[in-house]
Amino acid sequence: MSNRNKAKSSLRSRSEVALRNIVVISMIVFFVVFFVIPIIVAFVGSFYQWNPLKVQFNFLGLENWKKIFSSDLFWRSMKNTVLFALVASFFRVVLGLVLSRALYSKLLKHKSLYRTFYYLPTITPMVAVAFVWKFIFDPRIGLLDRILNSNINWLFDGRYALIAILMLTIWKDFGYAVVILLGGMYSLPKECYEAAETDGASSWQSFISLTMPLLRPTILFIVITSLISYFQTYIPVMGADARRTGDKNLSGNISDL
Amino acid sequence: MKKVFPIVFLLMLVLSLVACNGKPTPTAATTPEMSESAGETLPVMGNVIQYDPNQPVNNGEDITVEMWYWTGAANMFQDLADQYMAIHPNVTITLVENPWEDYWTKLPLTLQGEDGPAIFNIHNSKHDILISYLAPYDVAVEDLEAEFVGASGHVIDGKIYYTDYGLMTATMYYNTDMWAAAGLTDADIPTTWDEFREVAKQLTIRDENGDLVQAGFSYNGGIQGDVLGMNYQYGQNLFTADNEVTLNNDAMKAVIQRLKDLYEVDGVGDYNFGNNSGDNFGQGSVAMYLGWGFMTNVLKQNFPDTSFACFEIPIPTEVIPYAFHRYNGESTFGVNKNAPADQQTVAQDIIRFFLANDSIQKEFCLANAVFPMKVTLQNDADLLSIPSVAVLADHIDRYIWPGAMPSTVEDNMKIALEDIFYNNVDITTALTAAETAINDDLANSDFVSQEPMYKYASEAISN
């Protein structure tokens, strides 16, 4: 390589190294400042009676931990949160699979239109969604009770509040799974399906034996991201004003502290 | 260029973080018109607490003070600032508005430093997070007690840090059109709960299927603030001598049972007939609703087509009770003890101006639809024309202030009532759980009940 090219190459490498260092260091700094340090501070704070508004920082030892683990409300909230996360994730994946398979079918026309409708709830702000569903759940003027011909106070009755929030969440989020899974289906090797068709496999057999196993990584991705998101659910509960405080999820109860 | 871009990007990130320091943008101070009587002697204001506007503030030197308040009070505070600055043109009052939720985070954090507002609006429910930042008033306690009802309840170690300019409590709002349509007149206005139940039945309308069309009375959406007050009608205090809450008692059970009976026995309402009885009242589907004084202006603003009036909260029997209900006070302002000394002096002067000034006091009371605590205003015709205020005049001294109750009291009572009304938990179990949770929280607070300071405290039944 000529000296001139070597010099150019060397300059490019140095600038690339510099760029890499700046980006990586800034990401690390961001992560440490906004994630690691707050987690450490919160953990240390959990051993104190800490109210920054009153400049109160009194050491309590394990009292806070004892209080929360012996609290009936905490365990009910945990149960609700786990149940909510599992059920919402399950239906998100199942609905996503069913609808994406339908959209993938050659028999279906106007696929873009359906994709748009299914994805619209996903991109709608959650606060707006929760606010509208609050009216849908209203026992006097709400659409849901009229359709079901029932008289259920969805957001106030402890038997139905969790179901109401699940309906809202699944309605809002299934479109995300549809789009991801549809993309996954389009990326699957067509030779497998051709071979299966040659062997006489039905659509259902192809779906179970080919599509599902091949989509496993995608499904796993959706399940994990769903669980992460649903364990932190806060806006749908507060936005819809689900009043059964005792059955709030963990985020809702943390916000009350 | 490749090196410059990431550096510029980083700088922008840092700058955007610095810019988001949360300090609210102050409103531009209006320039008041110079007093037409500049150079002439202005009359001294007030009765016991007096304010001489002719005395210069800050030796006549220019000074700026910040005054914080929460959203919804802009006009009142602008008027106050304008009136004060007209008298003292060397003083600039910068008004800073914050939404209610943000106010109670930003204010105490700002007060910890030296650049916080010199004077700020107070709500007594936030007493425990504010008291350590307050400077005592430069007004004699005995003068405050002489001019303002209830001031004695705010004395701490011989000093007053704020008092109440207005009293707010619950009154029964009723739809006058529905009242007339049911054939009722002023003579039918109930004074006892039994009379109330009969009137509520007359105001209830159901369709041919038996479904509720018009509720005679509704309390959906949160009546915890009123349940925590109706116990006094039976002579039962909310707090014990040890400053612990007592809920699991006969009085509270009677109050809650009556509410249940109104729906389940009398059928005048339904737990599922709307989730916000105040809104439902304004929308014209509820005939009577127990609401606090601020609802007067809310209803006028949001539901101008709904005709309403008020009557005093009913009582168990014709005998005047220990107390009709509890009240809460709309508080005067706080002075920041960490502000520079000259700003504190101006803040104290503004306080005295406010306390001595009947005109501005009246304006604040009208805006909040509260009963005036200043004795010289208690016969004011304009204030007594407010529906929710007029009905209190005859028994104003029969309303009790329990003190600045920590929010845990209402929060846990709300949970208890939801369990009772919506989840079939029996009253004793729900009240016991609420009592335990509240007392656990109160153990970590400095709350002291003001019930012993009540004028008729000796009439309370012993716990």
Image (tube, coloured by chain):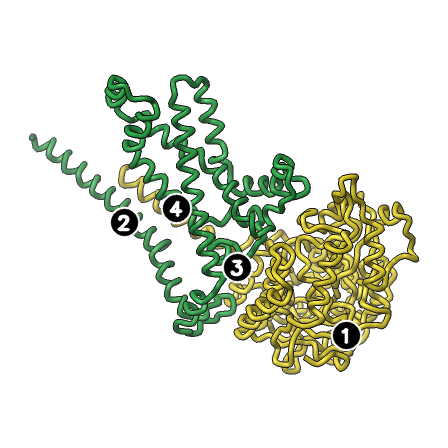
Chain colours: A green, B yellow
Marked residue chain, label 2: A
- Residue shown at 32%/35% (left/top)? A218
Q: Is residue B67 visible?
A: no
Judge by depth and name the residue closer to the eye, B22 or B320.
Answer: B320
Question: Where does residue B111 sit, x and y in percent of width and height?
Answer: 54, 66
For the residue marked with disc 3, what is the amino acid?
Asp
The residue tagged 4 is A227
Q: Is residue A173 visible?
A: yes
Quarter holding the N terminus of chain A is top left
For the residue marked with disc 2, what is the amino acid?
Ile
Question: Where does residue B426 sit, x and y in percent of width and height?
Answer: 63, 63
Marked residue chain, label 4: A
Q: Are marks 2 and 1 on the same chain?
A: no
Return the mark for residue A256. 3
Marked residue chain, label 1: B
Return the mark for residue B49. 1
Q: CA distance from mark 2 to mark 1?
A: 64 Å
